[in-house]
Amino acid sequence: MKIAICDDDKKDIRRLRSLIKKYDDVNQIGISISEYKSGTEMLDVYFDGEKPDIIFLDINMGDIDGLSVAKRIREIDDDVPIILVTAFINYALDGYKVKASRFLIKDDLDKTFDECMDDICKDIRKKSKTIAFNCVEGEMRLKASDIILIETSGHKNLIKLKNETYQIYEKLDVLEGLLKGYGFLRTHNSFLVNMAHIRGINSYVLTLDDGRQLPVPKARYKQVRQEYTLFVGKEL
């Protein structure tokens, strides 16, 4: 596992490196650590193709702040866990906008770091797990995180990924049960949506990260918003 630390304070970098090494010693993951002393340095290396599995990103940096760095990364990578590390606690809304996985307060790192790593590693394992689907095209093993939504079309359901679509005759209720625990939300009788791909819900319309808009029935609207809000809260 590759972990990147980006912070313009050498002392804070050393502290995070020490916590990561202690965590790795206990859990035997096999972690390599890259250190970046500015947001610009981080972005230069990132856009050259150096892609970590987890990023610890300081918010308050001199050249370019961590939120701006996270926004640039999200333009090309929607999945990498970004943990925002800060001395302050008033960045929750901004963190939501860049899909931060967690916040860590610097003064509380010794108390919160291990739990944060446990959660992130669990999420990574879940996202990498494949699920077997008996599709019209044959048995497909798909990552739940790659599925954007499942849509009913006639007597079939369409499993939609970014660049592929598979057809399956299984009922949507059964597929909903199969994907329970993977962040999917039944927004409509005909739609089962991966909440990680939702960009907003407003005025009975759900917007996905590819720009597609789906109707949310009035009877479901309150529940859909509540479940999505809970999901976003867990992600933050």
Image (spheres, rainbow, N blue to C red):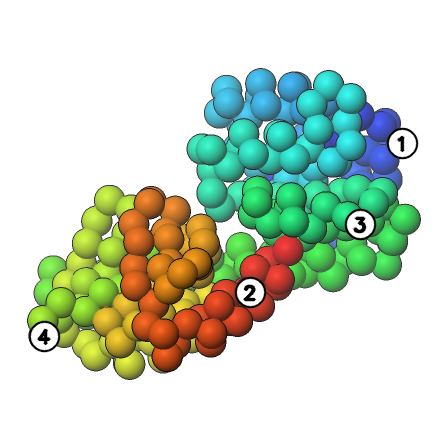
Is 48 drawn above or below residue 23 in the view shown?
A: above
The answer to whether marks 1 and 3 mark residues whose Cβ atoms lie closer than 8 Å is: no
Q: Are marks 1 and 2 in contact (CB under 8 Å)?
A: no
Q: Earlier in the sequence, mark 3 or mark 4?
A: 3
Q: Which residue corresponds to the image point at 51% horizontal and 37% vertical from the top-left? A: 74
Identify which residue is drawn at 24% across, 71% down: 190
> Residue tagged by mark 2?
229
Q: Quadrant of residue 160?
A: bottom left
Could you tell which of marks 1 and 3 lies nearer the N-terminus? 1
Q: Position of residue 161 (x, y in %)?
A: 28, 52
Q: Residue visible at 43% across and 58% down?
A: 202
Callout 4 amino acid: His
Q: Which residue is mark 3?
A: 89
Q: Secondary structure at mark 2?
A: helix
Q: Return the residue at label 4.
A: 155
**Dot 3: few (<14), some (14–19), or many (≥20) neighbours within 10 Å?**
few
Q: Which residue is mark 1?
A: 11
Neighbourhood count class around disc 2 (C-alpha, 10 Å): few under 14, some 14–19, many 20 upward: some
Q: Residues within 10 Å of mark 1 (few under 14, many from 20)?
A: few
Residue 228's mark?
none
Between disc 1 and disc 2, the foreground one is 2
Q: Position of residue 84 (x, y in %)?
A: 70, 43
Q: Earlier in the sequence, mark 2 or mark 4?
A: 4
User: Which badge, 2 or 3, is on the more N-terminal residue?
Assistant: 3
Location of residue 147 by image quarter: bottom left
